[in-house]
Amino acid sequence: MKNLKKLPESELKIMLIIWDNTPPVARNVISEQLKENWTNPTILTLLSRLVKKGFLSCEKQGNKNMYTPVISKEDYMLNESISLSAKMNKMSITNLMSAFVKQNGITKEEIDELEKMIYEFKQKAEN
């Protein structure tokens, strides 16, 4: 994963909508789902910036521009987590996880998934 730049809040709001929809996504879908009352030119400017930054690709379909994420939500969030951890004086993964769980909670399914991941990491480390 390449080193991603942190998105400003306005661009992140656009990306979250695109990630939450089945790509490709048209501007009107984004406009409908935005909680802000941004004008179409504002949305188009933000979309253009995201294309230039390499977060989105844009393809013309008929008379509409359709946007597809180039960077996955998971990759972006992982990059942000790693960046935050580095900023917090190399905060340990244990402390980062503990803080996240205290803030957001965790389900049994997520615990099971984490246990599976830890088991797989242990297997790789032993080999």
Image (tube, grey):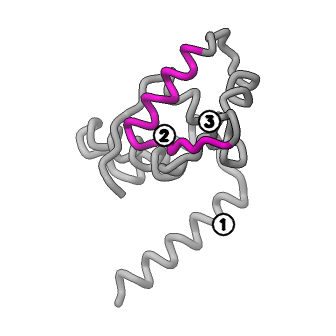
Which element carries disc 2, helix, strand or loop?
A: helix
Label 1, label 2: how far apart the Cα atoms are? 19 Å
- Classify 87 as above or below 78: above
- Classify 36 as above or below 7: above
The residue where tag 3 is placed is: 65
- Residue 104 placement (x, y as % from top left): 62, 38
Kindly identify the amino acid type of the residue bearing the numbered disc 2. Ala
Q: Which residues are magenta?
A: 41-61
- Residue 38 placement (x, y as % from top left): 62, 11
Residue 44: in magenta span: yes
Label 3, label 2: how far apart the Cα atoms are? 40 Å
Residue 99 — which label? 2
Which marked residue is nearer to the observer: mark 3 or mark 1?
Answer: 3
Which of 5 and 66 lies nearest the eye of the viewer? 66
Which of 80 and 102 lies nearest the eye of the viewer? 80
Q: Quadrant of the N terminus?
A: bottom left
Which of 114 and 61 lies nearest the eye of the viewer? 61
